[in-house]
Amino acid sequence: MGTHTTISITVLSDNRAAYGLEAEHGLSLWIETAGHKILFDTGQGEVMPRNAAALGIDIGRADAIVLSHGHYDHTGNLRLALERTGRAELLLHADALRTRYSIHASPKSIGMPASARKAVQAAGDARCRWVTRPTELDAGVWLTGPVPRETAFENTGGPFYWDEASREPDPISDDLSLCVRTGAGWVVCLGCCHAGVVNTLQHILRDLGGAKILAVIGGMHLCHADSERLERTAAAFGAYDIPYLYPCHCTGEAATAYLRQCFPQAVQPVSAGLKISF
């Protein structure tokens, strides 16, 4: 687990976009390491492939597609991605294929689109790698696998259920993150982090090794977080002394502003088109 690599990340889809690009409620990252090109999540609608084209990125060159979890805003272009990449391996947890709902005033289906589900089923085991534990994708590139839920203050971040009648809570056990070990520490890419960002970072440092988190980018699902969760999340970030924080997507504007107030030097703005390298 001690191999180091370099990483370049380009945001293809996010709730915000740089001039000339499009925004949507979705997330997709194009990740390049020393040995791999990875499409991490596929956004919600047609924004991701249009932004990729505008940025000169051919998603068909991906060696692997990784799904952080099975919600619609992360799997919307999965069929297209599978078609364009041809032989690229798809890495995901089996629960990503399940039907699921968010229930506020009424049930809303938030699972993977039917077209994506059919594409995964058609790809079959020959192309899919079912992630059930920490998994090394390439030298220094890891998927967390399912993250142990250990903190008392973190939860999935919403009223999520397997069924429309809200009888079966959805623990979103398919939630996973991608992390790359650089010489200066882990660079962690989150989807929505329904497992909790503190749980996720604890899991990486304990189970994958290393003593430093260099950067965290992605959705932290703090949009509905109460003050205790925000304060304890910030305290953990402070204890980990993370130099670079890139909260986006479902983190929420209020939570992002709070983190920026706590860590004015570390918190960086994110929008589709952002490119960062370590």
Image (cartoon, rainbow, N blue to C red):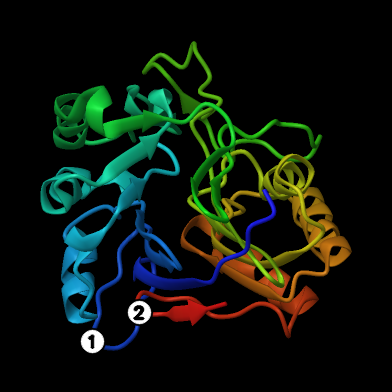
Q: Secondary structure at mark 2?
A: loop
Residue at the spot x=69%, y=54% of the render?
Answer: 2
Left/right placement of residue 137 relative to residue 3 reads left
User: With respect to residue 44, does 163 lie above or below?
Assistant: above
Q: Position of residue 196 (x, y in %)?
A: 66, 43
Could you tell me which quadrant the C terminus lies in? bottom right
Instruction: Pinpoint residue 40: horizontal percent, then vertical percent.
Output: 38, 54
Is residue 108 visible in the rendered image? The answer is no
Mark 2, Cα crowd under 10 Å, few <14 / some 14-19 / many 20+, is: many
For residue 47, say whether it is visible.
yes
Q: Identify the residue under disc 2.
A: 273
**Percent coordinates x, y for residue 268 in the rendering:** 60, 80
- For this rendering, which residue is in front, 218 or 177? 177
Name the kind of residue labelled 1 in the image: Gly
- Is label 2 in contact with label 1 (beta carbons under 8 Å)? yes
- Local SS, label 1: loop
Label at residue 82: none
3D distance between C-alphas at marks 2 and 1? 9 Å
* Residue on which the image places disc 1: 20
Residue under the image location 63 percent in, 57 percent down: 3
For this orientation, the residue located farthest to the bottom is: 19
Nearest to N terminus: mark 2 or mark 1: 1
**Residue occupying image coordinates x 67% and y 45%:** 200
The residue depicted at 82 percent of the width and 58 percent of the height is: 211
Tell me: 83 left or right of 245.
Answer: left
Reply above or below: 129 against 204: above
Left/right placement of residue 152 relative to residue 94 reads right
Three-letter amino acid code at the position of disc 2: Gly
Q: Nearer the viewer, mark 2 or mark 1?
A: 2
